[in-house]
Amino acid sequence: MIKKAILVIAIAWNCVNAAHVNAQQTATTTQKPIALQHGAHRIGRRTDADMEKWRAYGLGQFIHWGLYSIPAGEWNGKQYSGAAEWLKSWKEVSATAYDSLMYQFNPTKFNAESWAETAKQMGVKYVTITTKHHDGFCLWPSKYTNFTVANSPYKKDIIGPLVKAYDKRGIDVILYFSIMDWHNPDWRYDIKTREDSIAFDRFKQFTRNQLLELLTLYPTAKGLWFDGTWDKSWVKQAAFADSLEKEMRAMRPGLIIGSRFRADEYGKRHFDSNGNMMGDYEQGWERKIPEKIADVHGNDWDCVMTVPENQWGYSKVWKGHIKTTDELLEMLAKCVSLDGNFVLNFGPKPDGTLRTEELDLAKGIGEWMGINSEAIYNGEYAGLVKQDWGYYVKKTGTNKIYMLVFNVPVSGALNVVLPSRTAISKVYDLGNPGQNYAPEEIGTSAYFIHLKQQTFKRPFVIVLETADNSKNSGAQYQKAKT
């Protein structure tokens, strides 16, 4: 009976792997593809060095910062129930009053070196920073609008020093940019009249100018993270957006762009009308994580996550459940085990400092990463049947499989099922390599790893070094006869 169960698991593992390998094929292969001028530029993953590096990051940081940090979710003594950076959309707030916050923006305690050092100690490999959110305020001195940090009391560029500080520590920078711009008078939610069309044509040129300006001013930035692209006005700009994407890629070879930037000519976003992803990685995993490898369809992806339920920019009050260090580490492990990256958000205060709760989380994650980062960087889907104790991560290009353990069974025995013709050659604790384990074989390619203690204060990692076992692949366990 044991061998029969193991055989079923091995077959399932092979089926999962086959599905993963073939996931680049679209869901519509049984139908005739739709001829598209502005659909996906590529089918399947990018294989160049820039994208390989992105794929290996594991852990990232998101920073939402702007004028919205000043009211911090409050207006005239009333608490806004939505995300702080959406405050301007609240009916209680006039556009003129909100825009006047520019004259209060003076983050005298902002220190890009300090932010970058916090990120480095946390174990971050890339950061995404809001250059301009939906309110239209620019953290760089754009020459195409007066609504920038240059006209605030602070006067100085924010993005330049930040890029330099993170680059210095080997942390790649991605520039967030909102297409939607509440400050620009030419922005439209939809285009219904000739006047709307004329205005939006001006807005498109404005957007192009700002994006090319960012790529020119900050040449070491590795990619663009787009937002605010869901309104009908932009969705209708398939030809323009496609042309702009090609222009930016020609200007910066290797540029990485997510799936949110544009729609195809039929209005399909993220995935075109043939089911193929538009962009280099899927941006659909916002505050949620896939359950299984089939959910990501073979695409690159990352998950962006807040600490409270839905607060990106600084808010005085964090409502609801606040995620703990161990919760965030488990999210990180799950993302990497499913071929993704995990990106944790920070919302700096108006003075330019990070809130204490975020610093504490960064410290806790960093302490764990200081011991276990080997299991996160360059990690990929291991192709093994998931067990209840946690997550498997395979080190790209090696025979190492990491067991990221979050739930220790009361028995203290961790179940491991490997593919057929694979054996365990060595098992040890990543945090204490001298702590070796003798796996107990319980079936063909199935083992128990017996822990030498059962009380653990933090998640931990066990390393499996595997070896080919083809020569000993004969039947060792008799089938149960029924």
Image: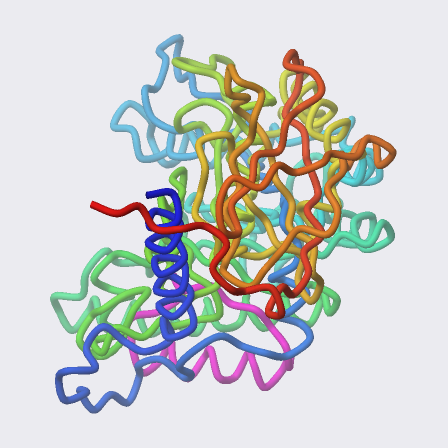
Q: In this view, does 249 lie above or below 68?
A: below
Quarter holding the N terminus?
top left
* Residue at x 74% of width, y 24% of height: 363
Q: Position of residue 228 (x, y in %)?
A: 36, 53
Position of 386 compared to 450: left or right? left
Q: Which residue lies furthest to the top in this view?
A: 77
In front here: 357 or 145?
Answer: 357
Q: In this view, does 286 lie to the left or right of 273?
A: right
**Residue 249 lies in the magenta-colored region:** yes
Query: Magenta segment, which residues?
Result: 237-263
Question: Any magenta on residue 65?
Answer: no
Q: Is residue 177 visible?
A: no
Q: In which quarter of the image is residue 237?
A: bottom left
Quadrant assignment for the C terminus = top left
Q: Where does the image place residue 150, in percent across and percent down from the top left?
A: 68, 47
Q: Position of residue 84 (x, y in %)?
A: 43, 27
- Does residue 30 appear in this view? yes
Rendered location of residue 65, percent (x, y): 58, 37
> Residue at the spot x=62%, y=33% of the render?
449
Q: Which of 405 and 33 is in front in this view?
A: 405
User: Is 422 or 88 nearer to us in this picture?
Assistant: 422
Q: In which quarter of the image is residue 219?
A: bottom right
Q: Which of 476 and 200 is in front in this view?
A: 476
